Amino acid sequence: MIEYKRHLVTAALPYANGPVHIGHLAGNFLPADIYARYLRAKKEDVKFICGTDEHGVPITIRAMKEGVSPQDIVDKYYTIIHESLQTMGISFDIFSRTSKEIHHKTSQDFFKKLYDDGLFEERESEQFYDAEKNLFLADRYITGTCPNCANPSAYGDQCEKCGTALSPDELIDPKSALSNSPLVKKNTTHWYLPLQNYEPWLKQWIIEDHKDWKNNVYGQCKSWIDNGLHPRAMTRDSNWGVKVPLPNAEGKVLYVWFDAPIGYISATKELTAQWSDYWCKEDTKLVHFLGKDNIVFHCIIFPCMLKAHGGFVLPENVPANEFLNIEGEKVSTSRNWAVWVNEYVQDFPDMQDAMRYVLTANAPETKDNDFTWKDFQDRNNSELVAIFGNFVNRAFVLMHKLCGGKVPAYHIESKDAKDDALYEKIVHTKTHIGNCIENYKFREGLFAVIDLAREGNKYLQDKEPWKKGDDQIAIDNCIHLCLQLCANLAIYCNPFLPFTAKKLIKMMKVVDRMLEWENGGSLKLLKQGYTLNPPELLFRKIEDEEIAAQIEKLHKHQIVPITASQSDVNKPSADLPTQTEEKDVAAIKPTIAFEDFDKIDLRVGTIIAAEKVEKADKLLKLTIDLGMEQRTVVSGIAMHYTPEEVVGLQVTLVANLAPRKMRGIESNGMILMAENNEGKLIFINPLAEAMNGCAVK
């Protein structure tokens, strides 16, 4: 077992032919960032490497469409991509470019060594040629029907619908992506890497030695190897890219999947003079983060290149994610069916952690997953606001109200079983989150953070310090533990929600060093008598109008394929109800006097327990804390929410409604709900900072 002294973390290089969307974030940037931030918090030696891939064929296609040079395209989108990822808190140590001179030289030197060692096969072959454009076509210039899934828009190197790696000869009815004209074949010379020579080594390295890789990664690699590998051309005919460093290679460039992964090496060279420590010493742990469409290139082709060259470390793991769909449909940049990161940060300024949270909570770690704006709103409001933010806010408000704005003493001789249980939960959560991150289970690690905040809410409700009167020792112990829990939450959430962690340490008036992982699990993070800042909202609620605007924007800006019939173009989206599809709105009831309305007592409460009512499919039995008391309320929401979904939510309660028995349970109040267009009941939530028992006026 190797004891690793340093870590090299990479995120797949995005093509610099357009902005990045949230699928890119969920697929590789966020997981890589969480992992790198965690390693830094542990004070490990880690370098987080990325940059833009600026030699891909999609770049030249985009340049042709816009009537500009490829350099204009990559300059434009490098800036947009870099700024977008920086704004979202993706903490690269370097974000480089494959158009830089250091990359060209590194790639050419790499190619030349393999050439000098006689590891390439030089072959003359017939390749597809566009007579109209008078040029040989690289694989991505060729489109046709995928032989595997019948996708009519597959590329010559890969079908982006089913993920199958292809060659142009496998396509059905191949055409030029530049002119849409049929293709002819002409002779050309290229240099091939004989992948079949590395099959015995790959079988041992992957199939035998890396059975612990994720199922999707291991399975795809095994399938490729079992089906037999073939020579693959490492050069292409083009004028845009890294020039092949041979005298007889005019008009030839390196295959993009040869030079792009070398971009990790050249970026590390650019970052540090000690680059070889990270790439050439066996006690370096190399981890590639990427989407499933890049598995073969990072697990077979690039490792074969590294093995052929010699002297480089190989990836210890490649935790690839599946795809993230948008509102039930596959992301399509050509149809503009995407949520673009640069637009999100404009529409939701200072809400980076809300998107980081939702994308991690809904990450496609084992299967394709779906992002919907409604789920984004629900998770933000019911989890970040109502659980995490609510607990922290209550702890700080109560500190200022009951303890003079200072961290109270902890009277250890007066602690009880609930205090001990909370401490054990804090310690256990640190271990659990660490294990999750180290095993690339980021969703589970994030849920552990929220569960700990939920436990804090429950602890506060059980302790009820606002009811302790003159029992200052009981008040002190409760508030002290809650504040220490807030400090631990800052440490635990930092890899996932770095902007939230920054807000927390500002509120606690502590330095960044407190966020180091070794400090987690301690009850001595905040000193007795230390004055803390007033609370500020960690998260804000997202309103229905904001979500409606995003859904409208997504559909409004969607590009309908030109093959669609006019009748299809004019059809309303299935996700946007027409006027006739909207639910009927009930007529307004007769006017009442203000005195009648004033009789209704509306109060803020928090659901602290929920369970299904036996033999009643529609009913949940809720226990609601009103600050001064707890109420049992029977609510007909079981068809819309599970008990687990509602615990921790703040609600508005009609508190002076006459009791009513339902299924033998006395219900003391009614929570306010509304109904959306789909018929789903939604909570009428108070503001997160409202105290339980506050009147709603």
Image: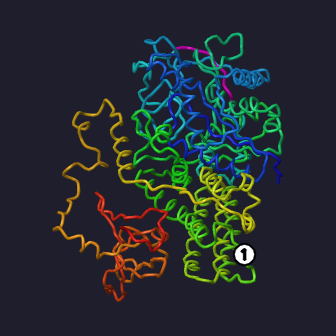
- Looking at the image, which is closer to me, 73 or 647? 647
Q: Is residue 144 above or below residue 127?
A: below
Q: Is residue 456 above or below residue 86?
A: below
Q: Quadrant of residue 293?
A: top right
Q: In what element is the residue under mark 1?
A: loop
User: Looking at the image, which residue is at 29% across and 73% down?
Assistant: 598
Residue 335: x and y in percent read 39, 35
Looking at the rendered structure, the kind of residue marked 1 is Tyr
Task: From the image, give the main secondary structure of the stretch colored magenta.
Answer: strand
Q: Residue furthest bottom?
A: 664
Which quadrant would the N terminus be assigned to in this image? bottom right
Q: Is residue 21 above or below residue 207?
A: above
Residue 678: x and y in percent read 30, 58
User: Looking at the image, which residue is at 64% across and 30% down?
Assistant: 260
Residue range in magenta is 186-194
Please indicate whether residue 444 sits to the left or right of residue 622 in the image: right
Q: Can residue 540 be seen by looking at this rendering?
A: yes
> Residue 191: within the magenta?
yes
Q: Can residue 208 be seen by looking at this rendering?
A: no
Label 1: which residue? 410
Residue 118: x and y in percent read 77, 23
Residue 322: x and y in percent read 54, 48
Q: Quadrant of residue 603?
A: bottom left
- Looking at the image, which is closer to me, 325 or 143? 325
> Residue 31: within the magenta?
no
